[in-house]
Amino acid sequence: MATLKGIYILAVLVSRDETVKVGSLGTVTFAKGLYAYVGSAQNGLEKRLRRHLRKALKRKFWHIDYFLAVNSVNVVKVFFKEAEKPEECATAHVLAQFGLPVMGFGCSDCNCKSHLFHFSSIDLLETTCLKLGFAPVYLSCQ
């Protein structure tokens, strides 16, 4: 899997309301619930996902790093699709039709409103991902 390139969606559960300093974006309040984050892994999916899933200290670079560093914020599912980077933004536009955008999150290198969306249910997110051609990703614990 280390050579896979494409785009991914992280299903992220926030177990309680949180206010987080998200780098250059500033302070953001996240309501308890489910979020979907769309990102790109053009240089190796496994390495990127392991970075996102690691709670240990790491240099925070992307907005998602600040969000995932919070103890009450956890990735619960991952979806992946082999695709070119431009499809990342097309996917974000579709997710915006089903979830509420966290304005400015994860989109400092494009013109999207957001790459993070608050969803009402995991079922809605899974259905949306599958309709877009994404597949669940399973990682070993090693």
Image (cartoon, rainbow, N blue to C red):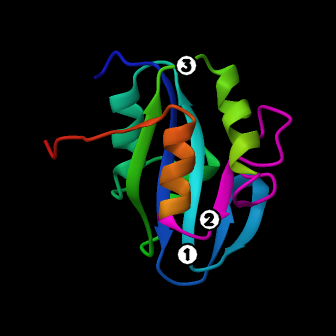
Vertical position of residue 102 compared to residue 1: above or below: below
Sequence-wise, the earlier of marks 3 and 1 is 1
Residue 11 percent location from the top left of the image: 48, 56
What amino acid type should be assigned to the residue bearing mark 1? Answer: Gly
Measured as percent of width and height from the top left, residue 121 is found at 54, 68
Residue 69 shows in the view: no
Q: Which mark is residue 83?
A: 3
Between 85 and 131, which is closer to the camera in this rendering? 131
Regarding mark 3 in the picture, which secondary structure is present there? loop
Q: Position of residue 125 (x, y in %)?
A: 54, 55
Q: CA distance from mark 3 to mark 2?
A: 23 Å
**71 magenta-colored:** no
The quadrant of the picture occupied by the C terminus is top left
Q: Is residue 64 above or below residue 40?
A: below
Is residue 110 found left or right of 8 in the rendered image? right
**47 with respect to 96 (left or right):** left
Q: Which mark is residue 119?
A: 2
In the image, 36: left or right of 108?
Answer: left
- Which residue shows up at 33% across the image and 39% down it? 137
Q: Which mark sits nearer the N-terminus, 2 or 1?
A: 1
The residue range painted magenta reads 97-122
Q: CA distance from mark 3 to mark 1?
A: 28 Å
Main SS, magenta region, reads loop
